[in-house]
Every structure is written in structure tokens, then in C-alpha cells.
């Protein structure tokens, strides 16, 4: 293992004679003791370079800014590396795995930057437990929870997944603030029984999560304090809002919700301003006949919807409904706008759709609401549009 001291290298640039001394840093053995001592003795700004695969059974504490260059090697941990408050550790260029069950491979009280490293825990061990700040610029992170975040997490790129199966681990368990700017959260796998593609669980959220882009597995947002914001990217499996607040707005023009139940509001409040809600995103997807379920309190201002089931309190101000809408009895549903669209001739489908809507809206009509359908006669026969308004 080598250690590069940035201050030493600056002196070497000025004094050629010093280059010989400092361009060949101290060579260390690969014992556990040497790794622990080198981290403990390193100075702020140093780069610690692994020369060969190593195993460490000591708990390591990082107390100043360091870079751990894995040198395309494997570092096996039996206890965590703890980044203390005020320190930043950057990990790059190699692999870190775990031997045995313990809390996590990295515990962040200060700041951790993952820049292209592969961090993979096994068993019940998390890849990263973040209490401070973690920034993922690339690489792979996996574990029971790939990242258990109760601090501030930013994912700029990379792949994060759980080594477990639902409902156990998740790629990210969030009780803090998590911002997903890009990358893959949840692992793409093949179902051996059906030969279809599915994603392992993505995010279990109890705090605040913002998804700006990337590919995400299933999302569970739970509890009165949970907040989930969907602004872009592809949610490959189902979204379940179980309390708190959720919002969708297609800020990047690529927001897609896929899965057998693309967006299910069981409890809580949701505001839908945009997005494509369908299980037909991938021709290899296992599910067909998507249902967007609203069971909490939902306001719809935009978006494009596949077959839709509405239950609870739903106010529709806009959006495009491409297939049938079913309203569950005892629900309070009001259409104050929106477009129902059918890619077929009026003669074949208009009466059928009106009858279906009247049947599904029977309880709403019984309550005294007026129901009307306005047909856009200027539209082409294959793209007839008609809006439904209940007053």
C-alpha cells in the first residue's frame, strides 16, 4: 500500500532532487495493522493507494479529508470504515466487500464520496449507513440496504441495489433527504419462472425523496412525514404512497410510471401534474392491464393514464385518460376537466365508452352531479377526443 502526500508532491515540483524521495512513497505491507495505521497516520489531503487485495478486521476511523484509491484491488472489511464529522473520504477505482454480518461497510458521520468504486455487502450488512452526507458520482453500491440514509444523499450516477428480495431490503431506505439525479436504483433481473424482466425494490421512503432522472425499482413512501417528488426518469415497478405527500411533474419530458399498479395512493395526499402512467413501458414487462389507483386524496392536473381506478377523494382538473376509468362506489370523484381519448372510430366505441362511464359513475350521478360528454368533431376518426365534465 502506498500513501501520496499532496504537500510533498508540491515541494517535489520545485526541487528536482526531492523527486526521487517523494515520487516513490513508503511501501507498506498488506497486514491489517499496516492498513489501520496508514489511515490513522495519514494527513489531510493524502491519497492512500492499495497495492494488492487486503482484508481488514479493525474498525477504521477517518478523521480528516482522504482519498482511498483501491488501485483496481479488493478490500474486504469485517468491521466498518467510519467517516467522522468534519472529514471527507473519497473512495474510487476498485472493490470493497464485506465478510460476515455487521452494520455496514461504510458509516458516514461526515461525508463520503463514491467515485466509481464497487461497494458490495453480503447478508444483513448495509453497503452504506449515512448519518451525514453521501454523494454517489458513479460505481455500484449493494447490501441489505444498498444505502440506509438518515442524512443527506445525492446520487448523480451509478447503480444501487439490494441483495435481498422484497419485502426485506431496498436499494435505498430513506429517512432523511435523498435526491436521485441519475443512475439505476434497483437491479434488473430475469424472473426464472416466466423469463420476464423485473426490478428489485428501489426506495423505501420515510423522509423526503426527489427523483429527477434514472431508472428506479418500486417506491414505497410511508408515514405522515414522508414526501416523494417525481420529476423525471422511469419508475420500472409500482409506486405505493402510504401516507404523507406525493407530487408528480414531468420536468424533463421523460417521467414514466410502469408496473401492474403504476401509482397507487393508499393513504395520504397526491398532486399529479404530469407523467405517463402505464405498464407498457417495456415489451418484456411481466404485467399487463395497468391500473392507476387513487385511494387517498388526489388532485389530477395533468398526465397520461392507462386503465384507471379511482377510489377515495379524487378531483380531476386535467389529464388524458386513454382507457376506461372505474370509480369505486362510496368514492368522492369530481371531473372539472380532462380528456378521454380513444384511438378508434366514433361509431364503434362512443356509445360503449359513454355507457361504461355512466355505469361506473352511477353513484356520482345518484348524488345529484350532472354528467356530460363533449365530442371533438374536428378530430381525426382514429384519434377521437371527448372530455368528461361532472358538475
Image: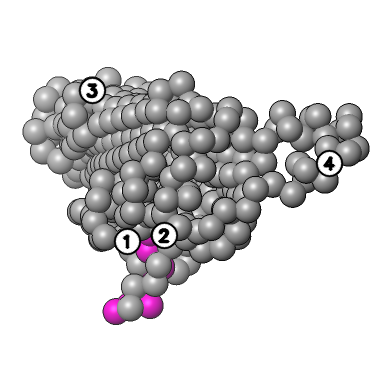
- Sequence-earlier tag: 4 or 2: 4
For label 1, the SS is loop
The residue closer to the viewer here, 370 or 65, is 65
Mark nearer the viewer, 2 or 1: 2
The residue closer to the viewer here, 355 or 295, is 295
- Sequence-earlier tag: 1 or 4: 4
- Sequence-earlier tag: 3 or 2: 2
**Residue that carries the numbered disc 3 in the rendered image:** 225
From mark 3 to mark 1, how far is it between C-alphas?
Answer: 36 Å
The residue closer to the viewer here, 21 or 81, is 21
Residue 228 drawn at (x, y percent): 35, 30
Q: Residue at x 46, y 43 (%)?
A: 37
Q: Residue at x 27, y 20 (%)?
A: 391
From mark 4 to mark 3, how far is it between C-alphas?
Answer: 57 Å
Please state the extent of the stretch shown in magenta in the rendering: 193-200
For label 2, the SS is strand
The residue closer to the viewer here, 122 or 345, is 122
For label 3, the SS is loop
Residue 383 drawn at (x, y percent): 54, 48
Q: Would residue 197 be counted in the magenta stretch?
A: yes
**Residue that carries the numbered disc 4 in the rendered image:** 19
Residue 275 relative to residue 123: left or right = right
Q: Residue at x 18, y 29 (%)?
A: 223
Amino acid at each position: 500500500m502506498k500513501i501520496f502526500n499532496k504537500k510533498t508532491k508540491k515541494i517535489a515540483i520545485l526541487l528536482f532532487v526531492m523527486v526521487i524521495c517523494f515520487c516513490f512513497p513508503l511501501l507498506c505491507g498488506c497486514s491489517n495493522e499496516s492498513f489501520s495505521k496508514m489511515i490513522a497516520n495519514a494527513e489531510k489531503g493524502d491519497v492512500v493507494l492499495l497495492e494488492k487485495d487486503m482484508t481488514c478486521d479493525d474498525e477504521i476511523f477517518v478523521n480528516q479529508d482522504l482519498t482511498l484509491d483501491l488501485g483496481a484491488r479488493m478490500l474486504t472489511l469485517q468491521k466498518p470504515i467510519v467517516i467522522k464529522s468534519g472529514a471527507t473520504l473519497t473512495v474510487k477505482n476498485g472493490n470493497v466487500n464485506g465478510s460476515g454480518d455487521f452494520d455496514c461497510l461504510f458509516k458516514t458521520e461526515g461525508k463520503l464520496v463514491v467515485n466509481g468504486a464497487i461497494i458490495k455487502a453480503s447478508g444483513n450488512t448495509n453497503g452504506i449507513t449515512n448519518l451525514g452526507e453521501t454523494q454517489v458520482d458513479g460505481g455500484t453500491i449493494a447490501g441489505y440496504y444498498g444505502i440506509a440514509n438518515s442524512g443527506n444523499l445525492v446520487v448523480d450516477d451509478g447503480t444501487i441495489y439490494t441483495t435481498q428480495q422484497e419485502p426485506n431490503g431496498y436499494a435505498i431506505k430513506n429517512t432523511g433527504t435523498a435526491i436521485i439525479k441519475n443512475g439505476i436504483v434497483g437491479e434488473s433481473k430475469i424472473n426464472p419462472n416466466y423469463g420476464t424482466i423485473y426490478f428489485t425494490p428501489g426506495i423505501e421512503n420515510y423522509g423526503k425523496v426527489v427523483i429527477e432522472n434514472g431508472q428506479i425499482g418500486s417506491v414505497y413512501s410511508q408515514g405522515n412525514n414522508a414526501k416523494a417528488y417525481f420529476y423525471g426518469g422511469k419508475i420500472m415497478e409500482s409506486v405505493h404512497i402510504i401516507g404523507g405527500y406525493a407530487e408528480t411533474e414531468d420536468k424533463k419530458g421523460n417521467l414514466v410510471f410502469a408496473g401492474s399498479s403504476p401509482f397507487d395512493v393508499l393513504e395520504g395526499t397526491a398532486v399529479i401534474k404530469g407523467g405517463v402512467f402505464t405498464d407498457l413501458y417495456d415489451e418484456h414487462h411481466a404485467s399487463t392491464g395497468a391500473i392507476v389507483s387513487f385511494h387517498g386524496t388526489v388532485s389530477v392536473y395533468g398526465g397520461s393514464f392507462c386503465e384507471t381506478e379511482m377510489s377515495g377523494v379524487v378531483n380531476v382538473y386535467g389529464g388524458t385518460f386513454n382507457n376506461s376509468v372505474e370509480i369505486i362506489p362510496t368514492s368522492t370523484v369530481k371531473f372539472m376537466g380532462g380528456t378521454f381519448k380513444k384511438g378508434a372510430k366514433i361509431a364503434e366505441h362512443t356509445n360503449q365508452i359513454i355507457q361504461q362511464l355512466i355505469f361506473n359513475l352511477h353513484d356520482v350521478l345518484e348524488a345529484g352531479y350532472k354528467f356530460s360528454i363533449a365530442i371533438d368533431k374536428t378530430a381525426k376518426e382514429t384519434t377521437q377526443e371527448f372530455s368528461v365534465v361532472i358538475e
